[in-house]
Amino acid sequence: MEIRAILFGIGVMGGEIARIISKKKRLKIVGAIDIAKDKVGKDLGEVLGLDKLGVLVTDDPDDLFSEVNGDIVVHATSSSLRQVYPQIARCVSAGMNVVSTCEELSYPYRKYPELANEIDALAKKNGVTVLGTGVNPGFLMDTLPIVLTGPCQAVSKIKVTRMMDAAKRRIPYQKKVGVGLAKEEFERMIGEKIITGHVGLFESIAMIAEAVGFELDVIKELPPEPVITASEVKTPYTTVKPGQVAGLKSMAYGIRGEEKVITLEFISYAGAKEEYDAISIEGIPNIRERIEGGVHGDIGTVAMIVNSIPKVVDAKPGLVTMKDIAVPSVMST
Ligand SMILES: NC(=O)c1ccc[n+]([C@@H]2O[C@H](COP(=O)([O-])OP(=O)(O)OC[C@H]3O[C@@H](n4cnc5c(N)ncnc54)[C@H](OP(=O)(O)O)[C@@H]3O)[C@@H](O)[C@H]2O)c1
């Protein structure tokens, strides 16, 4: 059965998702929403640099939802749940399922229990499903370690490390991890929340803890530390001079009593030579998994969103997380 998708947010991620959707036989794009002036009123194909798709980009979701019937809204506008809440609520109220890249939607029950319950209730009332996903949060630092505990009889600790070359990532990502800033500028911009660093470690820890039954006393996220480059690095976004910030390191812990039972280590800077995603589970048995080269975050996020579409459409109504829906798998046609 064909699934009709509406894009909400056609930035770097939404645009790439749209390109992949337009190639899938099972999926059809029937609407597109964005507020950027250079996109509104244009054919989506033209915005994406493709042939015309017969879908005009609008900045008025209510108007679109009153005219076009979609099965799912594919949402990619912001990391902040407070910001995206009204957008998600509009989609759900119009009777549409939602899959979103919003990091804070991936597991909102611990940081924003009220908003999470409101989305859940609204989705159930309208008989639709809402999921926040992506590569991280959504897969590498939560779903994958959760799945790897499947063959364990017991688990006492989980550690995940993600090491990436930020120069290979999209420009909005390079900006948010501080590529090319002076150290003081990085600290000020992080302090004033002008840049966010990576968003999602808190949500990944909360999701793992819930899935494996760790009763955490606290989730502690340390402020991101700048990684300073010793040699010049060129990226498609900027040139990072020696002594400037090439990216960051973020640490977060799920703590029970005095013990760090979950540790997430996120290191991303332009010029990183060795890239990998590693998971270490202490349990019976111990499990060590390492993806050499790592998973490219932008490619992986686009895939996670597109591959989740049929699973979200088939899922039970309500706000769901990656631990609640069918295991991730590629949608090959
Ligand atoms: N979970 C994950 O693993 C994962 C991975 C990658 C990205 N993400 C997240 O996904 C989000 C999108 O990333 P991106 O790189 O594509 O960002 P982006 O290039 O900035 O794209 C966002 C798009 O949404 C538009 N927009 C903003 N507010 C809107 C609104 N109220 N209604 C309609 N359109 C709106 C923006 O327009 P303007 O430019 O005019 O504001 C822009 O075109 C970010 O929050 C990012 O952190 C998550």
Image (cartoon, helix red, strand yellow):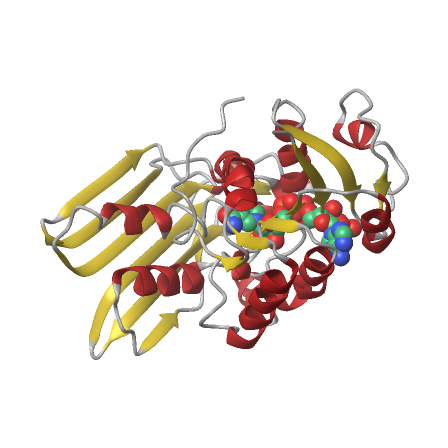
Residue 261 visible to the viewer: yes
x, y percent for residue 295: 41, 36
Instruction: Tell which of 234 and 307 is nearer to you.
Output: 307
> Where does the C terminus fall, quadrant-wise?
top right
How many numbered marks appear? 0
Q: Residue furthest right?
A: 41
x, y percent for residue 80: 61, 63
- Would you place residue 260 above or below residue 56 in this image? below
Instruction: Tell which of 172 and 90 is nearer to you.
Output: 90
Instruction: Tell which of 22 and 71 is nearer to you.
Output: 71
x, y percent for residue 208: 33, 59
**Residue 43, image quadrant:** top right
Q: Which residue sits at x=53%, y=45%?
A: 312
**Residue 41, image quadrant:** top right
> Where does the N terminus fall, quadrant-wise?
top right
Q: Is residue 185 left or right of residue 270?
A: right
- Would you place residue 130 above or below residue 1 in this image? below
Residue 189 visible to the viewer: no
Instruction: Tell which of 7 and 220 is nearer to you.
Output: 7
Q: Which residue sits at x=58%, y=62%?
A: 124
